[in-house]
Image (cartoon, rainbow, N blue to C red):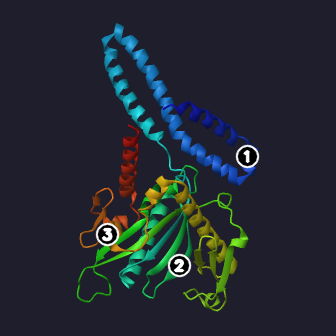
């Protein structure tokens, strides 16, 4: 806990800065300070409660020497101090630098044809409903729907409405291959099929974090091929952006305006370049992202959704529950909590 005094001092500095009206004239700086304040606030609250409990324990012990009835209070305070110290150790664990960021979620159908595309749509609804429950804002940046109502590929931005909401801290565990077992709507014999969809979760990058030289971009425009109305299909509104140095390609056709598709494409491009830069610079981040989808192959699954048994299983932590219908309606809290706990336990084990 050697870093605690420094963090307490930083909390005071951030608190003073946020009380300055001039700071809020710069929305970007105010947002950054607000997020840092939200990160530090739980640490400060527990540290202050711990100090108060220690003071109370000293008093209780002094009184217990004269009156035995205070001994029980001292014992209770000792237990509370142990709990607070454990909580503070957790809060002081190394943080993922992206935890407070918003995210971009990409869902892609894989093996299983139309059934996989329909499952991608189920995952999309699940994340949209989960975001709604959390009070987050969502925006579909790009969508390639299928004739039966599925999605070949869909890209969604998820943003917090409050500084204390850490979107990446919760959704970062969703990256990987998700497998479904059920009887498809197109199956006439009632046989259970297995198919998969891939999910990629990227922390959204601020423009100041990723500087992109316009000369490094090749931008092509073309006619949208998907549904969306006459104006979409008869004008060159779709945009394909290629980042020449890395070969990264982003295509957007969801909006009717070429400018809107270009702006959405640049958001996704920045997020992909930020993730690539962090992977290259940080071996730990690279290890963590190995769980993210590379190819949509059933053998690389991170989670299985079994409809006949109404069961959801996360294979990384052995989580299993029989409320699949609720999970697909956005009740992801329990499985995400299990993943967060496993992550925290691993970090605590590494510090001992």
What residue is at 62 percent from the left and 65 percent from the top? 270
- Mark 1 to mark 3 CA distance (whole Å): 47 Å
Which of the numbered marks, if any, corresponds to residue 23? 1
Give the quarter of the image for residue 126.
bottom left
Secondary structure at badge 1 equals: helix
Residue 210 appears at what percent x and percent y? 65, 61
Tag 3: Cα neighbours inside 10 Å, few (<14), some, or many (≥20)?
many
Of the pair 272 and 338, the residue shown nearer to us: 272
Residue tagged by mark 3?
305
- Mark 2 to mark 3 CA distance (whole Å): 23 Å
State if disc 1 and disc 2 touch (CB < 8 Å).
no
The answer to whether any part of residue 139 appears in the image is: yes
What residue is at 56 percent from the left and 89 percent from the top? 225
Dot placed on the residue nearer the N-terminal end, 2 or 1: 1
The answer to whether any part of residue 257 appears in the image is: no
Secondary structure at badge 2 equals: strand
For residue 196, above or below residue 149: above
Which of the numbered marks, if any, corresponds to residue 143? 2
For residue 306, above or below residue 349: below
Q: Is residue 110 shown left or right of residue 308?
A: right
Residue 327 appears at what percent x and percent y? 36, 64
Dot placed on the residue nearer the N-terminal end, 1 or 3: 1
Q: Residue furthest top?
A: 66
């Amino acid at each position: 806990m050697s870093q605690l005094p420094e963090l307490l001092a930083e909390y005071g500095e951030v608190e003073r800065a946020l009380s300055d009206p001039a700071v809020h004239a710069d929305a970007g700086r105010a947002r950054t300070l607000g997020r840092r304040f939200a990160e530090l606030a739980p640490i400060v609250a527990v540290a202050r409660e711990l100090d108060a409990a220690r003071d109370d324990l000293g008093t209780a012990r002094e009184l217990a020497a004269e009156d035995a009835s205070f001994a029980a209070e001292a014992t209770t305070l000792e237990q509370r101090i142990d709990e607070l110290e454990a909580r503070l150790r957790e809060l002081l664990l190394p943080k993922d630098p992206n935890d407070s960021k918003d995210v971009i979620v990409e869902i892609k159908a894989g093996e299983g044809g139309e059934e996989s595309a329909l499952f991608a749509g189920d995952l999309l609804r699940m994340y949209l409903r989960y975001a709604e429950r959390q009070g987050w804002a969502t925006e579909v940046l790009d969508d390639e729907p299928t004739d039966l109502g599925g999605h070949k590929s869909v890209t969604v931005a998820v943003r917090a409405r409050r500084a204390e909401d850490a979107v990446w801290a919760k959704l970062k565990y969703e990256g990987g291959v998700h497998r479904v077992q059920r009887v498809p709507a197109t199956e006439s014999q009632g046989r259970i099929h297995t198919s998969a969809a891939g999910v990629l979760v990227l922390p959204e990058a601020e423009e100041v974090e990723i500087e992109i030289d316009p000369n490094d971009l090749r931008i092509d425009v073309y006619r949208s091929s998907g549904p969306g109305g006459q104006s979409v299909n008869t004008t060159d509104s779709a945009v394909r952006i290629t980042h020449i140095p890395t070969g990264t390609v982003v295509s957007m056709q969801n909006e009717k305006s070429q400018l809107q598709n270009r702006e959405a494409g640049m958001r996704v491009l920045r997020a992909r370049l930020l993730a690539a830069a962090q992977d290259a610079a940080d071996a730990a981040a690279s290890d963590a992202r190995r769980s993210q989808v590379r190819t949509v192959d059933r053998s690389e699954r991170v989670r299985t959704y079994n409809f006949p048994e109404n069961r959801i299983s996360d294979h990384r932590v052995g989580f299993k529950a029989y409320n699949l219908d609720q999970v697909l309606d956005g009740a992801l809290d329990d499985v995400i909590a299990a993943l967060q706990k496993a992550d925290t336990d691993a970090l605590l084990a590494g510090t001992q």
